[in-house]
Amino acid sequence: MRDLAWRGEFNAVLNLFTSFGYFPSEEEDEKTLRASYRALKPGGWFVLDFFNAAAVKDSLVPRDERRVEGRVVVQEREIRGNRVVKRITIGGDGEARTFTESVRLYEPAELRALLARVGFTVQREFGDYDGNPLQDFSPRCILFGRK
């Protein structure tokens, strides 16, 4: 996603469900946006659907546990600097596997600035999937940028 082969071929590029911010640096995240920009036709749309950092910080559940198909799934979450880190442990049958994911906590203003730096003009923004306005503690930060 940081080096897409397409150039000026698409009317829209979608980055949905917080599939952004996983790279270890802002520079690598920016490469993703630049590649999306290059893939778009002039006037094309880029849609970025990201969690709202303020809402995540406010409502972070440090730990939960549930059973899935006879296995225990434990999720532990914490904020480390500007990232939310989640450790997932799946146990059962005498063994456990652990996975860790880390996502950058971009504030809406930071996302707008990144999009502008790449060349997008943010023309619409929403705070949830129902199209409500983006507010301080909206659950989502959905930005529509135009090339």
Image (cartoon, helix red, strand yellow):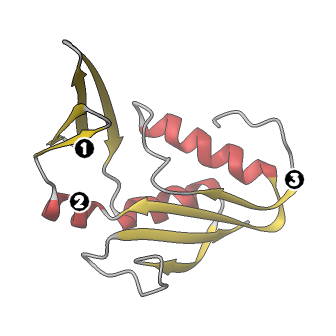
Residue corresponding to mark 3: 8
Residue in front for this viewpoint, 107 or 62? 62
> As displayed, is residue 40 above or below residue 6?
below
Q: Which badge, 2 or 3, comes first in the chain's sequence?
A: 3
* Closer to viewer: mark 1 or mark 3: 1
Mark 1 lies on a secondary structure that is strand
**How many other residues sit within 10 Å of disc 2, few (<14), some (14-19) or many (≥20)?**
some
- In the picture, measured across the screen, residue 48 lies left or right of residue 40, that is left
Residue that appears at 16% across and 55% down = 60
Q: Position of residue 147 (x, y in %)?
A: 74, 65
Residue type at tag 3:
Gly
Give the structural element (helix, strand or loop) at label 2: helix
How far separated are the C-alphas under marks 2 and 3? 35 Å
Spot the residue most to the left: 62
Q: Is residue 136 left or right of residue 115?
A: left
Q: Residue placed at 38% from the left, 66% from the top?
A: 108
Q: Kindly identify the residue that appears in the image at 86 percent across and 46 percent down.
A: 7
The residue indicated by pointer 1 is 84
Q: Which mark is residue 56?
A: 2
Near-viewer residue (89 or 55): 89
**Dots 2 and 1: beta carbons under 8 Å?**
yes
Q: Position of residue 86 (x, y in %)?
A: 24, 37
Find the residue positioned furthest to the top: 94
| Disc with the residue nearer the chain's start (1 vs 3) | 3
Asked which secondary structure carries label 3, the reply is loop
Q: In the image, is residue 124 above or below residue 120?
A: below
Q: Where 51 falls versus 86 (above or below)?
A: below
